[in-house]
């Protein structure tokens, strides 16, 4: 997993509430267990018309937002079914941080496991960042300092210390397990000697 320390981008503004996981990645794209190639299905029904042509008025189809790594959205982001393909699709598109007033619990947890930082801040701060995005102004996310810098404005955000450590060091569940590799190897060698029939 790629470490997350500091991120600067023009945020893509998506001021909609209750964006559910089916809107993020529709069901027809869930036939794979690979984490790559899902960017083409991200917000599919909002991004493309019935013929698969990109809609020119959808934010992620418009420069400079086609290369945004930060998404600012409305309340209750990621609600609906608990599909992990939703953060996979966002990450595959290049989104590393989402800012919204609140999230579905399952989606929120899945983001951390996939290297995405979901930040929950008050609505008035989200509104200011939506405006910054609409005005094509860059913002910076400083995970170490737990701050969002938007021009002269600085917004603090909370994050669980363990999750912060995992993101900053690029550790998913597998990475955390591999940190104990020497202990695992030592145990397996000892077990092979003591119980060779296993």
Image: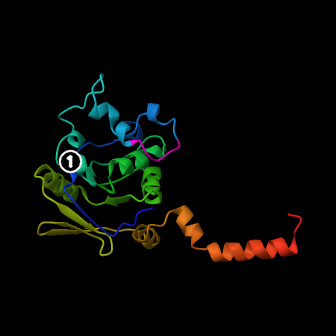
Looking at the image, how many numbered discs can be counted on the residues? 1
**In x, y percent, where is residue 114?**
45, 56
Residues in magenta, as a range: 33-38
Q: Colour scheme of this structure image?
A: rainbow
The part of the image, by quadrant, that contains residue 40 is top left
Residue at 30% in and 49% down: 75
Reply above or below: 127 against 178.
above
Reply above or below: 35 against 177.
above
Tell me, yes or no, whether the highlighted magenta stretch contains residue 37: yes
The residue at which mark 1 appears reads as 65
Tell me the element at label 1: helix
**In x, y percent, where is residue 17?**
29, 43
Task: Identify the image quadrant of the N terminus.
Answer: bottom left
**In x, y percent, where is residue 11?**
21, 54
**Magenta highlight: main SS:** loop
Task: Identify the image quadrant of the C terminus.
Answer: bottom right
């Amino acid at each position: 997993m790629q470490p997350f320390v500091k991120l600067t981008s023009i945020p893509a503004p998506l001021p909609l509430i209750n964006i559910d996981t089916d809107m993020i990645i529709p069901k027809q794209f869930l036939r794979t267990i690979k984490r790559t190639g899902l960017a083409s299905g991200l917000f599919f029904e909002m991004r493309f018309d019935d013929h698969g042509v990109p809609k020119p008025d959808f934010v992620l189809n418009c420069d400079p937002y086609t290369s945004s790594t930060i998404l600012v959205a409305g309340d209750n982001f990621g609600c609906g079914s608990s599909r992990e393909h939703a953060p996979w699709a966002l990450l595959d598109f290049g989104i590393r941080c989402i800012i919204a007033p609140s999230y579905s619990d399952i989606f929120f947890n899945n983001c951390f496991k996939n290297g995405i930082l979901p930040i929950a801040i008050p609505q008035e701060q989200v509104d200011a960042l939506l405006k910054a995005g609409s005005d094509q102004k860059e913002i910076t996310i400083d995970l170490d300092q737990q701050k969002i810098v938007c021009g002269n404005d600085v917004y603090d955000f909370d994050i669980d210390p363990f999750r912060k450590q995992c993101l900053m060091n690029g550790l998913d569940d597998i990475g955390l397990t591999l940190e104990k590799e020497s202990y695992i190897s030592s145990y397996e060698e000892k077990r092979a000697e003591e119980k060779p029939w296993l």
